[in-house]
Amino acid sequence: MGRTPKSNHVSLYLGASLMVLAGASSALAGGFALREQSAFYQGMSFAGAAAGDHLSSMFWNSAATASLEGINTSSTATLILPYGKVHVDDVELGPNDGIPGASIGGFDTAGTNSGDIAPAALSGASYGSYQLSDKLFVGMAINGPFGLVTKPEDSHYQGSVIARTAKLFTANANPTVAYKLTPNLSVGAGAQIEWAEGTFKFATLSPAAETTGFQGDGWAFGATAGVLWQTPGTSIGLGWRSQLTHTLEGTFKTQATTVPIVLANGTVVPLQVPANSIRSEVDVELPDIVTLSFRQTLSPATRLLGTVEWTNWSRFQKLEVTAQGNTIALIEANWSDGWFFSTGLEYDWSPDVTLRSGVAYEISPIDDPTKRLISIPDSDRVWLSAGLTYDYSADTTLDFGATYIYLEDSEFDRTSANDVRVLGDIEAHTFILAAAVNTRW
């Protein structure tokens, strides 16, 4: 059997790291978290993700840095093929500030469907570990833990006054250290160093008008920790990723536009909105994540895995753009906590091939139409996954995973900054394909 030169493995590792820095993705876990950090666990709907046995487990559990001896690297590339469509059922026009009895016009001529709001994306994750002694290990993970890209095909549909474009990109460096307290018990901890860039835009007052929006970036710092208990037949892992607070500093811009105003007598008059640009900032509160996983041998060739995960999305209450201490834009969220439950199976088909499958159910942090941001088509979802590992050589394995995510159709009830209430529903689903190269040096 042929072998891939190790220099090529280094190129793949670095390539996946750069992919984290260059790409973005639609949110594929509850809220706008990105669960897609491992092709290995992708094939089981992330059952067993914090229970070690694979280097990528260190994303969920820092103690997994000590699960493999020697020097190890792993790089994952994930192709995400999402679909989301917003349909507006009703629009209730509020009064226009400063013009008694008037309302914003133009809604009756705009479309009610957004078209597809979720473009395809490519993301990556990379991991490395090094054994310093019999008990001490160090590692590094490079990931994009949170992300979002949504943009409607029809940027002038009725819902554009709520959201026209939304983007969030994160790049996270996670150095870790792990120590074997006993041959079966490991503990680990790490730091999170994360950069984020965010953009959100919406139509100025009317669907046909120009765009108003914010764009900014900033750094945040946090921690990770975990514990891992492993025997030849059983593994149990508990991992924690701390909350992060990004203060994105940037610019809030309004483009010059003309908006039709409908007076009480039916007369339509133009309202001139001048261009404006203000230095501003917004705090983005990201959640703690706690993951509990197990891996249990059922027979020499079969293993059962499971995961329960809690995400502290109740930290995400609002996006408030401020300038010189004054609020200039406010997006209410008021999310609840999220939960994720998965189970999976592994089966050794042959000495070189291991097959996987998994199913999961995720409870969205958005439990009311008034909390649903139409730029984040999130709802309770079902995961169906399959995958495999192929032992390419004595020191190289290849992982493949595929997932279909079905999101329950959901309703939204949002009010724009100028008191326009928009009601409707969102339909969404996602296909995911992932591949990884793992090398023991």
Image (tube, helix red, strand yellow):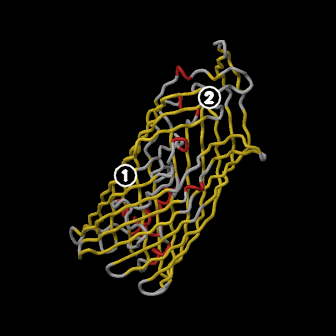
Residue 210 numbered tag: 2
Direction right: furthest residue: 324
113 vs 273, nearest the viewer: 113
At label 1, the amino acid type is Val
Dot placed on the residue nearer the N-terminal end, 1 or 2: 2
Q: Position of residue 270 (x, y in %)?
A: 68, 18
| Quadrant in the picture for residue 76 | bottom left
The quarter of the picture where the C terminus appears is bottom left
At label 2, the amino acid type is Glu
CA gap between label 1 and label 2 equals 38 Å
Q: Is residue 306 left or right of residue 113?
A: left
Q: Position of residue 376 (x, y in %)?
A: 51, 44
Tag 1–tag 2 contact (CB < 8 Å) = no
Residue found 21% across the figure and 67% down from its top:
349
Residue carrying label 1 = 382
Q: Position of residue 16 (x, y in %)?
A: 46, 59
Q: Look at the picture and state if 12 lies above or below 165.
A: below
| Figure label count | 2
Q: Look at the picture and state if 85 lies above or below 181.
A: above
Q: Position of residue 104 (x, y in %)?
A: 63, 23
Q: Is residue 313 left or right of residue 410?
A: right
| Quadrant in the picture for residue 211 | top right
Residue 336 numbered tag: none
Q: Secondary structure at mark 2?
A: loop
Question: How many other residues sit within 10 Å of disc 2, few (<14), some (14-19) or many (≥20)?
Answer: some
Residue found 65% across the figure and 22% down from its top:
103
